[in-house]
Image: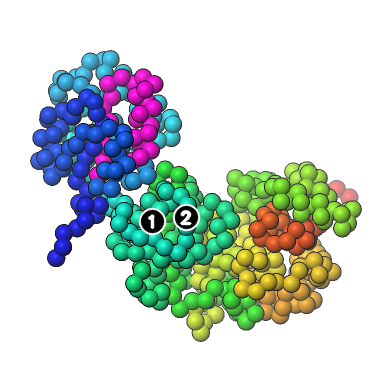
Amino acid sequence: MSASPAFAADERKTVLWLGPPAPKPLLLGACEQHGLRLRQIDVDDIEELAPDARALVIPVVRADAAFIKRAKLAVRHCARHGLRAVLVISTDALPPNIPHKAEIDEYFKAYGRLQSSGLQLSGLDYHWTDVAVELARHPVDAGENRGLTIVGVDLGDAEKICLLRRAFHDYRELHLEALDGGKSGARTLRVTEGDVPKSARPLVAKLSTPQKIDRERSGYGLIERGVPTRLYAPLVKERCLSAEQHAIAVYRFLEHCEPLTQRLETAGALFVDHLFAQTLGDLHRPIGQSSALLHDLYGAQAGGLLRWTRDLDEAAAAAHRRGELVPGAVELRALIAELPRVDFKSGTVHGDLHVGNLFVPDASNEAVIIDYGSVRPGGPLLIDPACLEVSLAFTPAFLLPATPPACLTFRALLLDAYRYPLTPASTRHLSGAIGASRTSMIRKVRDIARKLDDNPIGYAIAVAAQLVRFASYNDTASVDDRSMAYELAARLFSDTGVAMHQRRARQLGAP
């Protein structure tokens, strides 16, 4: 049996000491006792030695500008390669003796400045035996397998490639297949080993920012507790890693499943029933009744739907040219800001329940979900049915196997179907625009939305916010189709605004 490679987690025994000064003799001996190798290096050596190392020790002599600059560079190397960065006091004092006050002051000054820069590091002062114990027992991930060949997709980013070589360190050759268009900073990739058939348990790797991947992993915990095991893509936790600018989440590929986008013409209402009753039934249990302003409910810092982009301005201008009564983006934003608080039922929501995140098992109408970056407790329950409805009526072109017909062609049908208060019956003519199967799905979605939260104002607003989201990005569809979504959203916001003010007047007892 061959020995584990040096980058394997259990073989990362080297501790790097950023000198000068030289490592303390007591620390050298303590590291040897615990099976560690202590090696003095300079900043320029970290990149080369990082795959085999488990930690970097940075002694503080003086927290001046030169030291802080050097330490920042070193800690960033650590973040990219999964090394623990540790700050220690450079002192000749040994416990129980205490270092000079000036040494302690410099240590805490350096620690504060580095931490305030958003850098991840820990402090282990000057108790060298304890430092060695902590470095030996601290868990580490595998290092970068620089011998791993990656083919299929050019990621064009050294840190992303490093993450893949760390996450799949035990592979011999990675074959990557893009499952997205690379339209944002995030990338989703199907990963297989070079000489293994694609059918043999491939994985899906999602590369995004550390903050988004943290949310993905946090959301996955909620999914694990609230969704039946067979109805979501499982996370491979040991392959989920973070670096400085990017992070990776890895899932088991959904074998024996088809994307819903390939079954849109046949899935029908039964699929929607399974989705909300089985897949999301426990997740969607209401936890309370709340009220909020639209900006707080669906703004960039909440649901992330009301984002005022240049692409939205373009769609709004096209809609206004078609009909002068359609407000521009500035006017619509002002209208939304003036609306009263919205009452809504809250619970745990998926948050991004569009057709691209749904799969159908072979010979089944069950619904399997992926993508947990928007999962959150305490969200408006209506955000999920609204997201699904809009993605059925306005499916982004990049998710469909064939080029869809232009939405603007069916303007009259869409205007009729998206008239407040969005009853199931108002979809009766929608099949002429999007087909019978998708129409039956939307009808069922609206019926389920009323059961989740019987406030018609809440659902109309949730749909309008999702339509704004669709109109806000030019990679989803043509400007004509996005302008159609914008027109529907503007009318829904206007009509619900009237309904909200009338309702408020009734509550106040106005004639």
Image position of 80 (left or right of 321)? left
Mark 2–mark 1 Cα distance, whole angstroms, equals: 10 Å
Point out which mark residue 67 bears.
none
Q: Who's the residue at 35% across and 60% down the image?
A: 149
On whether residue 1 falls in the magenta region, the answer is no
Residue at horizontal 28 percent and vertical 34 percent from the top: 86
Of residues 432 and 280, the one drawn nearer to the viewer in this rendering: 432
Mark 2, residue position: 155
Work out whether mark 2 precedes mark 1 in sequence or the reverse, and give the earlier one. 2
**Disc 2 secondary structure class:** loop
Asked if the magenta segment contains residue 70, the reply would be yes
* Nearest the eye: 344 or 163: 163
**Which residue type carries mark 1?**
Leu
Task: Work out whether residue 267 or residue 197 is closer to the camera in this orientation and state it.
Answer: 197
Image quadrant where one finds the N terminus: bottom left
The residue sitting at 45% across, 78% down in the picture is 256
Q: Which residue is mark 1?
A: 164
Q: Residue at x 82, y 67 (%)?
A: 411
Give the magenta-colored segment's residue range: 53-78
Outermost residue on the bottom side: it is 363
Q: Is residue 252 left or right of residue 482?
A: left
Say few, some or many: other residues with alpha carbon within 10 Å of mark 1 (under 14 / 14 to 19 / 20 or more). many
User: Up-down: is 207 above or below 423?
Assistant: above
Residue 350 visible in rendering: yes
Question: Quick check: marks 2 and 1 in contact, CB under 8 Å?
Answer: yes
The image position of residue 258, as x and y in percent, is: 52, 76
**Within the image, what quadrant is residue 435 found in?**
bottom right
Coordinates of residue 470 in the picture (x, y in percent): 68, 58
Amino acid at circle 2: Leu
Tell me if I can see residue 335 in this picture: no
